[in-house]
Image (cartoon, grey):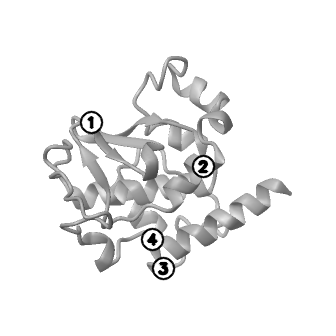
Amino acid sequence: MKKYILSALFLIALYACNNNNSPEIQPIAGNKDKTAFSTDSLQPSEMVKILGIGLTQEELIDDTVFFDGSKPTSWEVAGISDVKLFKLFLKQVQYLILNNDKVQLAKLISYPLGNSIKTENDFIQHYERIFSKAAKLSIARINFSQLFRNSKGVMTEEGRVWFSQLGNQFKIIAVNS
């Protein structure tokens, strides 16, 4: 029961925070079950095409001043070369968290994660401990126009989850539950 309530709250928070009116998720051709997707090895741009996830105009705009009056560091300083693709990656992470798809999420982690999570299997085994309710909610409440960034990468609220670009891939580099 707790799982269903958390999922419902997450979905409400995701909708309220992003309010993007995304189209309904479409199944892979010929598949009537909307939850059956093959997303192995998909890049963010491919994932959003299959899932119908997109960015609104508001999400594409970056504020020049944050709510607290501070000015954001450039995307280049954070090591992000393609901001739109990075934001699509964040949408992919939101979708995977919403669906508790720990197998696909494990592929988006830079290992080792902390001191104890060294492999995808470690991550999958300890998923609930790593992605606490607070960490999941910080993913759901991402404000795409006011993403904090510095030379370490990009973070969600209060530094709960950190992201970075490693080579040509975006990765989750830290989770602080």
Give the structural element (helix, strand or loop) at label 4: loop
Q: Which quarter of the rendered picture does the N terminus lie within?
A: bottom right
Q: State how far apart marks 2 and 1 are (Cα).
A: 21 Å
Q: Nearer the viewer, residue 47 or 18?
A: 18
Q: Amino acid at mark 4?
A: Gly
Above or below, 87 relative to 134: below
The location of residue 69, given as percent across then percent down, is: 25, 64
Disc 4 versus disc 3: distance between alpha carbons?
6 Å
Q: Which residue is mark 1?
A: 152
The alpha-carbon separation of the residues under discs 4 and 1 comes to 31 Å
Label 4 belongs to which residue? 52
| Image location of residue 157, percent across then percent down | 44, 53
Q: Earlier in the sequence, mark 2 or mark 4?
A: 4
* Marks 2 and 4 close (CB-CB < 8 Å): no
Q: Secondary structure at mark 3?
A: loop
Residue at the spot of label 2: 134
| Residue closer to the observer: 30 or 111 | 111
Marks 4 and 1, the one that precedes in the sequence:
4
